[in-house]
Image: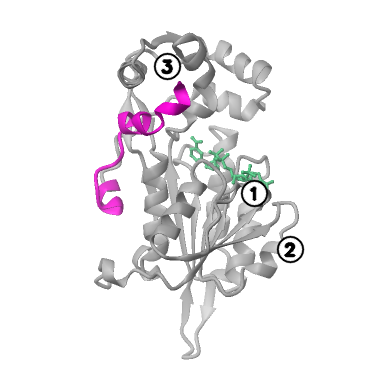
């Protein structure tokens, strides 16, 4: 194994980004630009991409990857985050095949915490995609000296994003000062900071590819119960937020009937019940302590006002 130092991280390589307009992807774009990388963002809505001299935008969708195929040569790394689409496995695999065939040396993809196979429909797509991409023949590279090397494939496996609090549970916090969820008030729940994921992804994309090889990193930043979460929300927002536990059926019905969510996502969000400890290796990947739920609320306070 080599000895890798911060000095060896690159700022010269061009990095291709898929998913750069989302809650997480936009932070990855910011991180890469901050460190001086030149990046290309593939986006269906170019106006959503941050404007910067170092950023080139290519307009495109998952359903037609020709713009991606044409624009990816010349890049050496790919950050890949595919949104919650029903054919997520096929999209991740199709983009990865194109990328490796275009001589991308490393893909850093956003996967999901490893759960038993077929436990949840919406996590299976990620699990299957990881297995297929890992085995892609396009990852093999025949070098001039007759030696075959394998291009890097790194998976980040976060659990519930802290931003889910805003994406799925904001209305009742804002309008009724109530956090609604299905967990027992004292049940520990896992949270992953979007900032932590973005910083880990950006660091890996700047590290030498040999450092992370084909690693798959679990990412749990903080554990907080619903009662701890309302205590933090109350303190930071300066008003009392209370917790209301509802049944999984009530939560599911709200997601499906009021929010128009599909069955697989609503079932997952209403019934998820699993807790791993804060990832011990995360400070090694981050070079700092993981972000807490409280820090995340402080940074995003305005969204709750
Ligand atoms: N949320 C969680 O708790 C969690 C936990 C673990 C893993 N994950 C994984 O993280 C990923 C992102 O999750 P999210 O829902 O939080 O993402 P998000 O912030 O909604 O971002 C999704 C991204 O995908 C893009 N996108 C969606 N459909 C597209 C299409 N048809 N063509 C091109 N671009 C498209 C979006 O573009 P626009 O800006 O144009 O919409 C956006 O850039 C998913 O793979 C999810 O499984 C999420």
Q: Quadrant of ligand 1?
A: top right
Tell me if 225 is positioned left or right of 72 in this view: left
Residue 189's tag is: none
Residue 66's tag is: 2
Residue holding disc 3: 183
Residue holding disc 1: 47
Which of the marked residues, 2 or 3, is nearer the chain's N terminus?
2
Q: Nearer the viewer, residue 48 or 117?
A: 48
Identify the element where label 3 is drawn.
loop
Tell me if 254 is positioned left or right of 157 in this view: right
Tag 3: Cα neighbours inside 10 Å, few (<14), some, or many (≥20)? many
Identify the element where label 1 is drawn.
helix
Indicate whether 272 appears above or below 242.
below
Which contiguous range is marked in magenta?
A: 282-305
Q: Residue shown at 25%/53% (left/top)?
A: 287
Q: Disc 3 to disc 1, how far (Cα)?
A: 38 Å
Q: Is residue 297 magenta?
A: yes
Mark 3 vs mark 1, foreground winner is 1
Indicate whether 234 appears above or below 13.
above
The percent position of residue 29, horizontal first and vertical second, equals 49, 54
Which of the marked residues, 2 or 1, is nearer the chain's N terminus?
1
- Determine contact: label 3, label 1, CB under 8 Å: no
Which of the marked residues, 3 or 1, is nearer the chain's N terminus?
1
Residue 181 visible in the picture: no
Q: Residue shown at 31%/39% (left/top)?
A: 291
């Amino acid at each position: 194994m080599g000895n890798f130092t911060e000095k060896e991280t690159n700022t010269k390589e061009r990095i291709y980004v898929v998913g750069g307009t989302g809650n997480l992807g936009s932070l990855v774009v910011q991180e890469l630009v901050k460190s001086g990388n030149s990046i290309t963002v593939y986006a269906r809505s170019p106006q959503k991409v941050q404007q910067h001299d170092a950023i080139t935008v290519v307009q495109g969708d998952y359903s037609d990857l020709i713009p991606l195929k044409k624009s990816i040569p010349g890049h050496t790394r790919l950050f890949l985050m595919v949104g919650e689409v029903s054919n997520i496995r096929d999209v991740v695999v199709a983009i990865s095949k194109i990328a490796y065939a275009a001589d991308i040396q490393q893909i850093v993809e956003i996967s999901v915490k490893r759960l038993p196979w077929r436990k949840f429909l919406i996590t299976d797509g990620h699990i299957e995609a990881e297995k297929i991409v890992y085995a892609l023949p396009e990852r093999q590279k025949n070098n001039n000296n007759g030696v075959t090397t394998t291009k890097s494939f790194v998976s980040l496996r976060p659990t519930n994003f802290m931003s889910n609090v805003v994406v799925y549970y904001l209305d009742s916090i804002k309008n009724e000062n109530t956090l609604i969820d299905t967990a027992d008030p004292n049940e520990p729940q896992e949270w992953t900071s979007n900032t932590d994921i973005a910083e880990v992804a950006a660091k890996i994309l700047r590290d030498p590819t040999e450092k992370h090889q084909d690693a798959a990193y679990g990412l749990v930043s903080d554990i907080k119960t619903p009662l701890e979460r309302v205590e933090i929300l109350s303190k930071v927002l300066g008003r009392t937020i209370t917790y209301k536990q509802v049944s999984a059926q009530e939560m599911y019905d709200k997601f499906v009937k009021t929010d128009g969510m599909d069955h697989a996502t609503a079932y997952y969000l209403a019934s998820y019940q699993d807790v791993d400890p804060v990832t011990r290796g995360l400070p090694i990947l981050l070079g700092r302590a993981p972000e807490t739920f409280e820090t995340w609320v402080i940074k995003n306070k305005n969204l709750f006002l």
